[in-house]
Image (spheres, coloured by chain):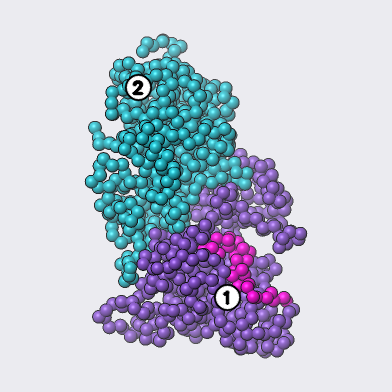
Amino acid sequence: MMAHTRMSPRLRFPGLAPGQAPGLAALLLAGMVMGHGHALAAPPGDKEAMASEYRAWLDQGRTAARAADFVRTHSPGFTVVDPLASEPRPVEPGDRLIFVDRGRTVLLVVMGEAPLVQGARLIAAHIDTPAPRLSLVNMTKSGQVQVKARFYGRIRPHHWLHLPLAVVGRVAKSGQNSEPPVEIDIALGLDDDFALYATDVDRRDQSLTIMTSSISPESTRTPAPFTLVQVLSQRYGLTAQDMQAAELYAVPRHRAREVGLDRSLIGAHGQDDRANSYVAWRALVDLPATPAHTAMVWLVDREEEGSYHPAGAGSRFLDMVFAYLLRAQGARATEAVLGRSFERTQALSADTPPALDPNWPEVHDPRHAPILGQGPALFPYTGHGGKQGGSAASAELIRDVLAVFAAAGVPVQPGLLGRVDEGGGGTVAQYLANRGIDTVDIGVAVLSMHSPMEISSKDDLWVTYQGFRAWLAVPTTRRGATTKPRQP
Amino acid sequence: MWRILGACLLLAWQGCAGTASSSSTSPGTSPGAPASPGTPASAPSASPATGPAAAPGSPAQAGKEPDPLFATRGQGQGWDAVDPDTASRVARFATDYAAYLADAKTPRRAVVGLLAVFRDGATRLEPNSRPGRTPGSRHWFTAPGGDAAALVLVGQEPLEQGVRIIIASVDAPRIDLKQRPVYSSAGLAMFDTVLYGEPELESWLSRPMALSIHVARPGAAHGALDLLIGDGPDDPVLVIPDLLPHLARKVQRNQIVDSPERMDAVAARSTRALIDRLANHGVDERVLAEAETSLVPAGPPTLVGVDRALLAGYGQSHRAFAYAAVRALDEAPAPRHTAVVILISQTEENGRGVSGIGFVKTAMSRVLASLSSKGAELDVLDTRRAYARSAALVTSRLSGALGKGVILCPGSDDAVPGATRRVLDSFAAAGAQVQLSDEDGWSSARVLSILDIDVVDVAIPSKGQGTPMELISTLDLYQAWLAAGVWLTR
């Protein structure tokens, strides 16, 4: 179907620039050769341990691809499977598998006691995040001192001006189709003693101007001044031609920080939705025993642009993995069987609702806006202008989810995305629901959302982790069981 | 951190064989620095035929006859006029400055940092002291609040012959806490805030902030409790939240921040937790009512661009010139006329208050009274003569191009052409480039001119004025240092 660079033992860890943390890179490389993830940490014992690991996740997973890499290399006991490479091998209850597509969407699976045709427990979250994306049009010009950045996802341009910025992303070098892309890091690590800086926003053009250097290369100086292209060439061996196939984002140079004099909150870029991605992934990895039904966590890319991408929630990657596992269990993976498996699957769409903003209370519905620190928020529906363009969850599903969270001692608060007449938004819930999977939105709330300094609560991360872990472990309630039992 | 920066900075200029040196802020320790900014190695002559910015060896449009009416046209400007040796000096000066700026988050801290540069060998000038006038001796004193100061280098001529002055402000827009700032909203403990100066409000949203608390404590060291929480890499920070785009469509359509009352900061999970943490720092909630409390941007300044030619940092549009002036004063040889650098605050609030523009008069009175050649206070005639023979530069916030030199603004300050010419000539003698601005508006130079002193506005060009990270060129900073050195001693 497509030329792809799926999991292969030749994949090297592309996350860090040369000279950065070689110990970590070597460790990750070792994990790659074995085809297994490498555990760097035991399950977090308390919310502070979790918050500290979470900050490391945010700092290392600056792009969807890096977050996917982090998951693939930090999941102990999981085997990486390429569903395209070979005939499915038999799987046993308790088997732990990771499926990766294009290096940027990850589906983690813990096989349950019941066959997959009985349904699964799925949590979906996205690992992409809104950020300025460098425009390639003028990346390939010679002698440039500034680059233009377009907006990936909905950002507020004023947040990105006058802020020390770094550039992260990847470049596919020309003539090297079989090689993984080159990971780019400029001004992010401590080795770089400089930042990039956006001076202007063009609101009509929807773009930012980012200064990469300031001494004009056309000047009469000798030697000629240093430019971004020279850095890319010296550091990564890239040419202007290579830069035609690049995906580069501007990210804030600051790392994840503790917020509040009591250090109870976390401030960082990218928490929408790497907050719930992290919590869901941790919950699955830390499942203590084989669950009754197969438990899955799907981390997707491109949610902020509408999920239209082979690595997005709208893609058929989930179907392919289901089909692979059905065949691995000896079932026929026909559309009908796949459909029945989906119908018996229950899913949580774990995305970040906006927390009540103390400075702008009037845009929220005061009785339904999530409050930071009071547990995950459950949205029966998303959309704009009320319920337009979103999916809605059934009463039965909401009852089941609330019961599991209550039994785990996790407080759940109701959530709505602002006042009906102020705006709205969507999540990946509809893409799961369109497949026939019963889905409800529930997730850690975030304040100052879609900004370079989103704020979450350590308490929320911790209790949501407990809730997700409990929910993944309980048996799926069979849809339609009260009316007419179905046979697989 | 700054030592790393210092070492790396020197590698920035390709081909300049700078040896890594420590980034000490103490004056005169940088190897290779010019002995005096007044005599830079590459300073061209001030002959009007070559103009102020003529760089020796710059390939000035070969084959073209220079137009005598526009002597500087076509000659190397900005970075084109900088040779590798100068570039490494520019880098070294920027490193020293960045180390200073990192700690200068409030006016008090800015003054403390500048006194540290100058204070070696200087004596404190008490109100009624008569230390005697020894050429080359150094003196300093501060305003009662500690956010204004005067630094004096005594010259050979008596004070009645006039003094050379640079008045530099050290305050910057910021967000202060109100007297009873703690309240609870949306399940969070918040700090109620009030603006100081005119911060560019939207740029202060959704970014890490540090909290500065200054409480007068007669028993404590230096008589005060001085906290800065959030500036260290592992400190907790505060954040002023902003709306997500999904819900900002209506309320932020015309103006992103419609009221300064929208600028309250998330302070903790609960008021109890907040009050407990403040108590751990030795601050009672009630003490906040008498303290100076401010939110300032967290973290150090940073070089900008892969060529490291710019520098972004908080509060630079004034503090950069203040640093350049104090470094120049510190490194100056005994001048003919007494040289004074006066650091003032409150300029963001139109200069009112004891540490504002009024401090210039206070400071000059004390200098004239204590250091006069007559061993007694000067009479009115001598005092008026001293003022009338003096000349001052005052820092202002002016717009101009980065990397094109120090800005003068003859329009805004009503400076007479003679006063402007004196400044231009001394900057030319320093080899410093000058750009002119035609901004018009409130100027402290106008206010100060009623003291009978010729005052001219100067500025280091900056971008992002009033934002948490203002941007300047390291070259302009360096040139301000050269210019200040010549101005104070010529």
Residue at (46, 82) in percent of width and height: B429
Distance of label 2 from label 1 (alpha carbons): 76 Å
* Residue A410, placed above or below residue B107: above
Quadrant where the N terminus of chain A is found in the figure: top left
**Can you identify the residue that label 1 sits on?**
B330
Within the magenta stretch, is there residue A234?
no
Callout 1 amino acid: Asp
Classify mark 1: residues with Cα within 10 Å, few (<14), some (14-19) or many (20+).
Answer: many
Q: Is residue A165 left or right of residue B102?
A: left
Residue at (32, 60) in percent of width and height: A144
State which region is magenta: B98-127
Chain represented in cyan? A
| Secondary-structure class at tag 1 | helix
Q: Colour of chain B?
A: purple
Quadrant where the C terminus of chain A is found in the figure: top left
**Can you identify the residue that label 2 sits on?**
A325
Q: Is residue A455 left or right of residue B229?
A: left
Q: What x and y, as percent, mark residue A259?
A: 57, 45
Question: Which disc is residue A66 wearing?
Answer: none
Q: Chain of mark 1?
A: B
Residue at (60, 66) in percent of width and height: B113
